[in-house]
Amino acid sequence: MMHQRWFAALCLFATLIGGCATTPTALEQSSRPITGYLDYSYDKNSVIFNTRDSHPRTVFFDTYYPFDPSLRYNNAEAMVRYELDHAPFVHNGVLMVALADLRKIYAPFMSYSVDTATQRFTVQHHYFRKRVAAGSGSRAPRIEYTKVAWQGQYSLADASAISSSATYPTVTDRNTIDASPVAGSSAPVTATLAATPVQRDGRIYVPVASFMRTLGKTITDDSAASGYLAVSHVGPQETTNDLFNPKHTGVYPMTPLTPSRVKTMNGLLDGTISKGNLWFAYYFGDIDVFTGKADASGKPINTTMAVDRVLPWRIYIPKNYDARTPSKFTFMLHGGTGNENAPFERPNDHLKQQPTPIPGVKFFEDYADRYNYIVLSPNGWTRNPVWGSGPGEQAMLYTLKLVQARWNIDANRMFIFGNSAGGAGTMNFVLRHGHLFKAMAPTAPGGSKPNAKDLQGAIANMPTLLSCFAADVTVFYAGPASNSCQTWYQEQVKAPMRNLTPITIENGHHSYGPASLYEITFDFFERALDKTPPKNVTAVRLSTGRGTASVTEASGATTTVKLATPPVNQNGTLLAALDDLARIYGEKDFRVYDVHAWNQKPADLVSVKTVIHNKVSVNIKPGERFLRVGLTIHAGDTIDGKTRVTASDPRVDQRVLSVPVQNVNGKLLVPVVEFMGLFGRRVNVE
């Protein structure tokens, strides 16, 4: 630094006497080419530029689901904050933006080349219209894709522009988009930009509104009133487009500069909005990634990968976050057809229409507030992210660094969970970065999940809550191990994972299942932080009508525990209350939960009591003999998309309780000897 300052001072002096000539910065010549279509897990409709002096590099994106644009946000409106590499500036009243920044914003579907001899440059930009032809709102809608390729020619000498477009045939197979011939083209159109493009420090700057209009964009300029200018793929007048299809409207409109959006953007820029749901984005170009393979010596094999796109991420900052106190933190990873918003939006849609186990706690954000966790949901770059390698892994590591730089994260209180591809990714990421986390909670792990040979070392002892969904028709409950949860657990996970608690969500739906687990998941994480050892109860003595229990622990010490409900005898079977069993075995380690799940419609709601103790979960139903222990198989569980386990299947666990669960004065009583035997505990009846 000292040498640089000395050289600069010397050059300043030399310049005054005619020496120390500097070489002009070379004009940028070209960008990455457009290589073809890629179906992202993230898409942008509008890019909103801030035209005021404060935060000039900050722009905002709005978003919608690209795999089915009719899936609209109903629980929170995503306004994604992105920082440009180069500060825009106002020239003669016109906002000028670096061409290199625009290319990143629209990457990989924009490129340019510069002819330094003629001082002219050419820009290509592709846009893909998407329309839902069938299956709106389903996991696999039929989407029609129409490619429109724009080209513009511009000059650094004047404001003239010539642009044209070519439209390609509409296809339903995204893999054929780039192979299709041109269906029609427009004649070149001349236009005059609002200002002549200029170069600064070797960078080309263009008048963003008029420039993007020549490439087919719709412009909404409210800079005089609100300070914002929006560049959109399509405009509200295009009602045949799914963005503005009346059939697909949601709670939040997609028009770019609503009063609500302006208020939100202002709050984000001035810092008055600093908690709750927040969205950010960054650009990845060429990055070094782990291939998922190792060489003969076991050393990981890496490669350079051209990601070339903007990746968003969503974070939830709880309402009681205090920057002075290190915060608890968890990753929440999306699945194969999701994005950073899916882990919030889909479970919250589910939670809206079911009972809440905790008064006043309804949505995922409420749980994050109650337990005071910062929750990070990154974007996995494309369909079916493999979070333990490739761009997905790097996205996680990079966003974690960004979060740690901005918020006060406690490195000793970090967790991770995810669903489907995110469930597999949870485990794959922990295989390589297990030192970061205290516990993990994968749900319905997808096809890239690890097997027994992988589950060695630290992961085998990590506190793990593994959940499978009995009605899952995506990752089947009891199908082949390659695409099922229960069978894979039985064959590949049960033996090597020594600190795992398995749990089944009755009637659990693949996308909604995690919504039934939030209380259990956060309690599981909290227990992993609690250094109090569990009570090691080896024997319990109970008697009919007696208000106390004699409890013996492994140390040999015997204590007396007062019961709230004296046990009752029903036809020779002793029944004890669940809350009394929690007193006996420790309320931190004997947990009883209300678990609700609906699958196709809210009327199908199934409710159970799930009891978790000693790494075993048991599902029961008040008034019934129903019993499911951990990840055992029952009739009706899914084998594939259409087939269900039959009652005669030899894998079916035939166990039921000897007597129904009883409700006595609001307390649930269970046949205590057999019930506690399910958890490996011995109860003696006197």
Image (cartoon, helix red, strand yellow):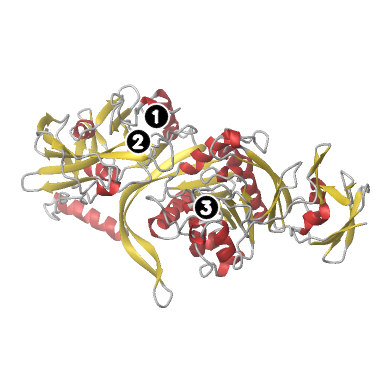
Residue 303 in the image: state x and y as whole percent.
33, 65
Q: Nearer the viewer, mark 2 or mark 3?
A: 3
**Mark 1 in CB contact with mark 2 (< 8 angstroms):** yes
Q: How many angstroms separate mark 3 from mark 1 (CA)? A: 30 Å
Which amino acid, by three-letter code, is at mark 2? Val
Q: In the figure, is residue 290 to the left or right of 624?
A: left
Residues under labels 1 and 2: Cα distance?
Answer: 10 Å
CB under 8 Å between callouts 2 and 3?
no
Dot label at residue 132: 2
> What's the amino acid at mark 1?
His
Q: Nearer the viewer, mark 3 or mark 1?
A: 3
Q: Which residue is mark 3?
A: 476
- List the single residue furthest toward the bottom: 297
Left or right? Give the position of 196 relative to 549: left
- In this figure, which residue is indicated by the disc labeled 1? 248
Give left or right: position of 580 versus 514.
right
Earlier sequence position, callout 1 versus callout 2? 2
As measured in the structure, the alpha-carbon distance from the residue carrying label 2 to the one carrying label 3 is 27 Å
| 152 up-or-down from 528: above or below | above
- Along the polypeptide, which appears first: circle 2 or circle 3? 2
Q: Secondary structure at mark 1?
A: helix
